[in-house]
Amino acid sequence: MFFGKNKRNRPQNRIDSLIGIGTKIEGNVFFSGGLRVDGTIKGNVSETGDQPSTLVLSEQARIEGVIRVSHVVINGTVVGPVQAQEYVELQSKSRVTGDVFYKTLEMHVGAIVEGKLVHQEGVAEQPGEVQPVPSN
């Protein structure tokens, strides 16, 4: 529960957009609110706007690129760094090949991270060493 926390800390609890199974996107994706991915994205995924957004990756989902969001729930595959300003949940089928930057982390049994887990103290901090994956 989020007692006494500001709105920035609350995850988006509704899905506004869906990238379905069998859908493949090549290029960067920008979204606000909630985005669920069941398909494949080759490109960076970032939130826009001043409200916190939530990215949910299903077991079938695959993202090859940098993820920059407030909150992320992963149960699929990510090849690239994950930068969450607030919360990362790595569910049991998740596989991340890249560093994970987080403020709060929940990791289920079976989750795999091939990279560093890096705790971020402040919300405003953005890791400077990670270079975005260029889109073709």
Image (spheres, rainbow, N blue to C red):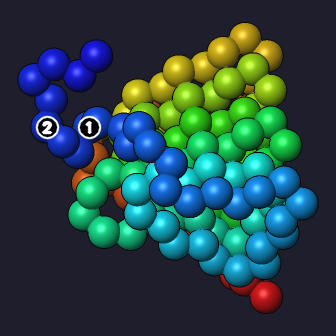
Looking at the rendered image, the quarter that the N terminus falls into is top left
Residue 9, which numbered label? Answer: 1
Residue 50, which numbered label? Answer: none
Name the image quarter holding residue 111: top right
**Residue 125 x, y percent position in the rendering:** 31, 53
Looking at this view, is 91 or 37 the one in front? 37
According to the picture, the residue beneath numbered tag 2 turns out to be 6
- Badge 2 vs badge 1, beta-carbon distance below 8 Å: yes
What is the crowding at mark 1: few (fewer than 14 residues within 10 Å), some, or many (at least 20)?
some
- Give the residue type at disc 2: Asn
Circle 2 SS class:
loop
Name the image quarter holding residue 3: top left
Q: In this view, does 44 lie to the left or right of 68?
A: right
Looking at the rendered image, the quarter that the C terminus falls into is bottom right
Q: Is residue 90 above or below residue 8?
A: above
Q: Is residue 2 left or right of residue 48?
A: left
Name the residue rendered at 51%, 34% in the picture: 88
Residue 98 showing in the rendered view: no
**Residue 43 x, y percent position in the rendering:** 71, 72
Q: Is residue 41 above or below residue 2?
A: below
What is the crowding at mark 2: few (fewer than 14 residues within 10 Å), some, or many (at least 20)?
few
Q: In this view, does 136 lie above or below 119?
A: below
**Residue 85 x, y percent position in the rendering:** 37, 47
Q: How far apart are marks 2 and 1 (CA)?
A: 6 Å
- Give the residue type at disc 1: Asn
Name the residue rendered at 80%, 26% in the picture: 93
Circle 1 SS class:
helix
